[in-house]
Image: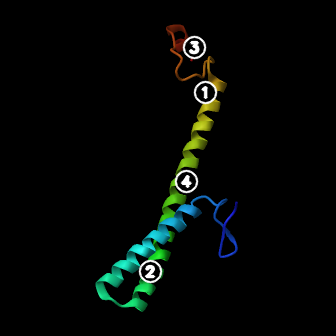
């Protein structure tokens, strides 16, 4: 079952969206309640809560998307390495194959 935030942000199908909204909600609660307990100003605490939601959500969004991009880069490199390993295994281009004395003199 899909959940759309603000009518257009499909939280289920976008990577990192669900976690960003959840951490943003938690950050909003913590910052708003903390500001209220410190100052007892309701309206200002609501403003701090909204700001805390936005900052926490965007902060976690960028952190999560950066880690996701790094993971995809590592997966692509691993996939390319495995393809090269299969391609060159057993040939004279195999870097793990021990070269004998006669093979060294040929190259």
In the depicted view, which residue is nearer to us: 54 or 70?
54
Answer with mark 3 or mark 1, whichever residue precedes in sequence. Answer: 1
User: CB of mark 1 within 8 Å of CB of mark 2?
Assistant: no
Residue that numbered label 3 is attached to: 106
For numbered disc 2, what is the local secondary structure?
helix
Sequence order check: which comes first, mark 2 or mark 4? 2
From the viewer's side, name the closer residue of 68 and 106: 68
Q: Which mark is residue 68?
A: 4
| SS label for mark 4 | helix
Residue drawn at 54 percent across, 17 percent down = 97
* Element on which disc 1 rests: helix
Could you say where residue 86 lies in the image, as x and y percent from the top left? 64, 25
Q: CA distance from mark 1 to mark 4?
A: 25 Å
Circle 3 Cα neighbour tier, 10 Å, few/some/many (<14 / 14–19 / ≥20): few
Looking at the rendered image, the disc whose residue lies closer to the viewer, 3 or 1, is 1
Circle number at residue 49: 2
Q: Which label's residue is closer to the chain start, 1 or 2?
A: 2
């Amino acid at each position: 079952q899909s959940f759309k935030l603000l009518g257009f942000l499909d939280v289920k199908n976008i990577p990192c969206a669900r976690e960003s909204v959840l951490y943003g909600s938690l950050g909003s609660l913590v910052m708003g309640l903390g500001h209220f307990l410190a100052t007892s100003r309701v309206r200002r605490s609501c403003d701090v809560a909204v700001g805390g939601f936005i900052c926490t959500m965007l902060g976690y969004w960028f952190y999560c998307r950066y880690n996701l991009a790094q993971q995809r880069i590592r997966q692509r490199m691993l996939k390319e390495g495995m393809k090269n390993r299969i391609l060159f295994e057993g040939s004279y281009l195999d870097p793990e194959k021990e070269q004998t004395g006669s093979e060294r003199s040929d190259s």
